[in-house]
Amino acid sequence: MKLFDTVKDFFLANDDEDEEVNDTPVKPEQPPVRPERPQPAPSNFPTTPAEREEATAEAMRRSNRVVNIQTTAQLQVVLVKPSAFTDAKQIADHLLAKKTVVLNLETASPENKRRIIDFLVGVAYANGGSLKPVANLTYIITPYNVGFIGEDLVGELENNGVFI
């Protein structure tokens, strides 16, 4: 019986061992707050309105410096002549690497031409670039950091003596 009482005592709490539960939240101890002493102004701190105005003008002169940063990255142009739609992935990789692509679709079938153009327009759009026709079945696809001068490139080429 003693074993049974021990197991029963283990799983069931005795009434004489109950403790009172206090539901009031306990506040964490806070470190004592020291009163702040006023800090003396630094020796170069402007105290008069004229000194403050001069310091503001000096700060503006320092912040308006123009720094010439020459980029070491060269813009690259890639010429491609795909014949199958599977070549479009390699062209998309060039666009993702911020390279300008000149796309010649003379050897592609009519169905592949449409699929390649649709796919590459989507890639260019997703990256902020653009696709423009420059000649018959020839397009230029640029990333976002390369712009065009002139809207009608085919018309400009024809006006300058290049006939398509």
Image (tube, helix red, strand yellow):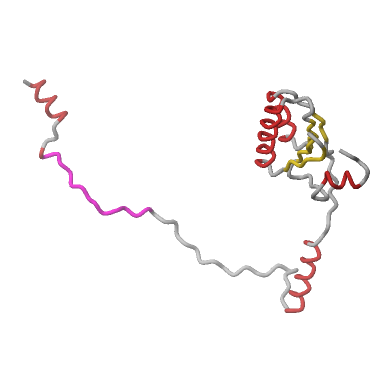
Tell me where residue 33 appears, x and y as whole percent: 47, 62
Quadrant for residue 126, please give it: top right
Q: Report the magenta stretch's main SS.
A: loop
Left or right of 18, for residue 70: right
Total marks in image: 0
- Frontmost residue, 36 versus 138: 138
User: Which residue is at 69% across, 27% downward?
Assistant: 112
Query: In the image, which residues are magenta?
Result: 16-28
Q: Is residue 138 rendered to the left or right of residue 15?
A: right
Looking at this rendering, what residue extends furthest in the right direction?
Answer: 161
Q: Position of residue 65 (x, y in %)?
A: 82, 59
The one of 111 and 20 positioned closer to us in this rendering: 111
Residue 162: quadrant of the picture: top right
Residue 24 included in the magenta stretch of the image: yes
In the picture shown, does residue 30 fall above or below 2? below
Quadrant containing the C terminus in the rendered view: top right
